[in-house]
Image (cartoon, rainbow, N blue to C red):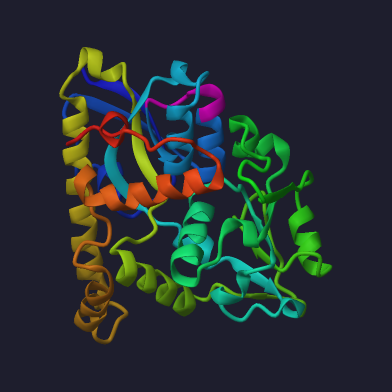
Amino acid sequence: MATKLKFGHSPNPRLQPLVDGAVKVEGVEFEWDFSSPGPLFHKQLVENYYDVFEFSISDYLIVSSRPGWDHLGWVALPVFMSKPLGLLVRLYANESSGVRSFADFKGKRFGVPDYGMTAAVWLRIMLRVLHGIQAQDITWYNGRPADQRHGRLLDIDHALAPGLELINCEREGELNELMQAGKMDIGMADGISVPIQPTSNVQLFGTPRRVRDFVAEIYKARKVTPVNHTLAIKRKLLDGDPSFAQRLYAACQASKEEAYKRAEAGAAGYLLFPEEAFQDQAALFGEDPFPFGLEANRATLEHIAEQQRLDGISAEAPDLKRLWLDL
């Protein structure tokens, strides 16, 4: 009889072949629960509900290094299916802010859903590497209300590094109000607890072309692209089924490859020259835009960990081989 496991994830085309049964994990039946990342991660932190789950890389590094979180008993697989591009294209700027490029962020007031979220960590990496802008050069605002804020659970919703200013919004919609009133220069919307309404005062800054060029710059400079989530499991699953992690990893790899095939097969339905579109992306970001494996993602994870140390979120470099199974 197949073991039933609760699997929590946000909708993701690279996971879909596993969801629809085109790819299977022998001996296991998943009970799928799809949710937006913010609420899903919050539920896992509070209830430890899922057996297999998508999780924030930044939050995972925090809970793995701080006392009091050992009871969760998690270990991650080197599966990386998500990039924070949806958040980066939901960046808004107040028209009076003078923000016309990422280089203009210095000295500005910037609201993000959660200061410690991986998307915000990546923004700080990219601003520092590409434009020399340090976290202390920006006044930061946490946009999520306290009862939804991961930083409140993890005790990082206050200034942790010298010279860093971090202000908490406490009401849902407060970040949007500050944006509309011109009391905040830039805001990142998550589409759920932190909405931002485009108006004559507040306009979309994170256009797809601008974000694509920004991501291409960091790839050219460091050979990394922003990756924000990983896949984790409860370690106790391996006690009774030692090969489960390997089987799940192989299934995720097969699911991703099947998703790539589906994308290529369907591209001609809309794109006039699909071959060129795929070649253009490969030229910018490599043949596999979502590589799996610890070594293939070591530089990416080290960039996140380095920025966390600069932010005061963590004090030491993590042991990546302890936190991610080397599959």
The residue lying toward the viewer, choosing from 67 and 89, is 67
Q: Quadrant of residue 95?
A: bottom right
The residue lying toward the viewer, choosing from 18 and 54, is 54
Residue located 22% across and 72% down the image? 282
Left or right of 275 in this view: 15: right
User: Residue 16, image x and y in percent?
Assistant: 31, 49
Q: Residue furthest front?
A: 162
Vertical relation: 166 (above or below) 53: below
Residue located 61% across and 81% down the image? 100
User: Residue 258, image x and y in percent?
Assistant: 19, 55
Q: Residue furthest bottom?
A: 272
Q: Is residue 170 magenta?
A: no
Residue located 21% across and 51% down the image? 296
Residue located 28% across and 34% down the image? 324
Vertical relation: 97 (above or below) 32: below
User: Residue 223, image x and y in percent?
Assistant: 28, 64
The answer to whether residue 93 of the structure is visible from this angle is yes
Which stretch appears magenta? 45-51
The quadrant of the image that shows the C terminus is top left
The quadrant of the image that shows the N terminus is top left
Left or right of 325 in this view: 122: right
Vertical relation: 121 (above or below) 21: below
User: Residue 53, image x and y in percent?
Assistant: 39, 34
The residue lying toward the viewer, choosing from 208 and 122, is 122
Q: Residue furthest top?
A: 240
